[in-house]
Image: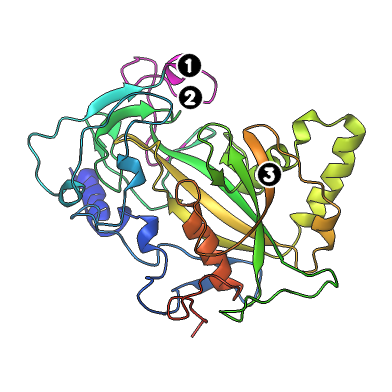
């Protein structure tokens, strides 16, 4: 009982996070709460605002995790109104749809077994062998043997397309450079007066949306290794390179991923694949090539899960997969780069 009470306390206070509340409100400029590790290379933006998912969600939060049909299927979620997203809001008639994709039920190495299997005894809220079952947002509750989404109801139970019960950890490398003219000078946006930042974007094969390259953290793998591997596979087509090409590519990637970097977000992601029992969490890290010299020698080539890859100018006009636009905005604000033509919303770090 003591453990369950502790879990519920954490759920009420700090578990429910939505990225819409992480970003700065467009109605005005205010600085982002952050913790810096000296001047430096590591900038942690951890839950600057806490979503009220346990008590009732905001209208602009936890939206993509309630969309239908569920990705890659014709499954329609049970509709969850904004005022009933939070678990602390009583809803006796809540009747979510049960769905786990056949590709997950087939038992690939990256997926858990079904909860009902007698040989499966996951250690939720702990490091379970090589599998990380801790959430980056604290403790999550277990209800009837299943972990419960800390951000609230989604209208669907099971795992959908996600392999793990509970948190599914990913890593998103945000590779940036300054946009420059033919003479090598940084280009300034005519309205905001700020330099334009570019990032490497991929077009996902599964949904056709543009996104940050990235992917799931393998059991026992360090985040830094995931970031480098995923960028190489999706933005440089490293899996199809010859041995000699791979060695040269590895040297270039080492230079790029040895650069100054900023951890711009860690935690829950409002993702269309989320369910009541499985959800995405990520660590989004910005690696910035200040001079552009490294990236000038790195030939972008779509590979693995990417259909296309290109440099994209950062602005508030971007429409990206899941919560990637929020991550990109955080990078622009931290780098003091152009974001919006609305000068009131384009915060200047004041």
Q: Which mark is residue 111?
A: 2
Q: Which mark is residue 309?
A: 3
- Distance between the alpha carbons at the discs numbered 2 and 3: 28 Å
> Which label's residue is closer to the chain start, 1 or 3?
1
Q: Residues within 10 Å of mark 3 (few under 14, many from 20)?
A: many
- Residue 173 image offset from top left, x and y in percent: 63, 51
- Residue 51 belongs to the span the image colors magenta: no
- Distance between the alpha carbons at the discs numbered 1 and 3: 31 Å
Q: Quadrant of residue 159?
A: top left
- Distance between the alpha carbons at the discs numbered 1 and 2: 6 Å
Counting labels gives: 3
Do the residues bearing badges 1 and 2 touch, measured as CB atoms within 8 Å?
yes
The image's colour scheme reads rainbow
Q: Residues within 10 Å of mark 1 (few under 14, many from 20)?
A: few
78 to the left or right of 226: left
* Residue mark closest to the camera, 2 vs 3: 3
- Residue 121 belongs to the span the image colors magenta: yes
Q: Quadrant of residue 189?
A: bottom right
Vertical side of 334 occupied by 223: above or below: above
> Which label's residue is closer to the chain start, 2 or 3?
2
Location of mark 1 (residue): 107
Q: Residues within 10 Å of mark 2 (few under 14, many from 20)?
A: some
Which region of the structure is painted magenta? 102-127
Query: What secondary structure prevails in the magenta region?
Result: loop
Q: Residue at x 66, y 40 (%)?
A: 308
- Secondary-structure class at tag 2: loop
Q: Residue at x 34, y 42 (%)?
A: 65
* Residue mark closest to the camera, 1 vs 3: 3
- Secondary-structure class at tag 3: strand
Vertical side of 101 occupied by 247: above or below: below
- Residue 246 image offset from top left, x and y in percent: 85, 36
- Residue 260 image offset from top left, x and y in percent: 71, 65
């Amino acid at each position: 009982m003591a453990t369950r009470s502790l879990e519920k306390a954490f759920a009420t206070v700090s578990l429910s996070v939505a990225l819409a509340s992480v970003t700065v409100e467009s109605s005005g400029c205010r600085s982002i709460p952050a913790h810096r590790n000296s001047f430096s290379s590591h900038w942690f933006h951890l839950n600057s605002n806490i979503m009220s998912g346990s008590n009732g969600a905001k209208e602009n939060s936890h939206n993509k995790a309630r969309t239908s049909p569920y990705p890659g299927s014709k499954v329609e979620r049970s509709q969850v109104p904004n005022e009933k997203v939070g678990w602390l809001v009583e809803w006796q008639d809540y009747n979510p749809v049960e769905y786990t994709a056949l590709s997950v039920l087939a038992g690939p190495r990256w997926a858990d077994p079904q909860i009902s299997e007698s040989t499966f005894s996951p250690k939720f809220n702990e490091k379970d062998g090589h599998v990380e079952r801790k959430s980056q947002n604290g403790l999550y509750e277990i209800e009837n043997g299943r972990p419960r989404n800390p951000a609230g109801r989604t209208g669907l139970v099971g795992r959908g397309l996600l392999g793990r019960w509970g948190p599914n950890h990913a890593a998103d490398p945000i590779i940036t450079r300054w946009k420059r003219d033919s003479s090598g000078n940084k280009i300034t946006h005519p309205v905001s007066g700020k330099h334009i930042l570019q990032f490497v974007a991929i077009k996902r094969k599964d949904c056709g949306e543009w996104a940050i390259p990235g992917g799931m953290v393998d059991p026992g793998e360090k985040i830094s290794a995931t970031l480098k591997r995923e960028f190489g596979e999706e933005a440089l087509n490293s899996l199809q390179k010859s041995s000699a090409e791979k060695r040269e590519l590895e040297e270039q990637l080492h230079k790029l991923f040895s650069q100054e970097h900023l951890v711009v977000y860690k935690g829950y992601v409002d993702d269309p694949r989320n369910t009541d029992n499985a959800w995405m969490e990520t660590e989004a890290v910005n690696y910035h090539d200040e001079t552009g010299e490294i990236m000038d020698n790195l030939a972008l080539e779509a590979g693995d899960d990417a259909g296309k890859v290109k440099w994209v100018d950062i602005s508030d006009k971007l429409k990206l997969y899941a919560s990637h636009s929020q991550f990109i905005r955080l990078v622009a604000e931290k780098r003091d780069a152009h974001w919006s033509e609305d000068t009131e919303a384009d915060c200047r770090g004041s």
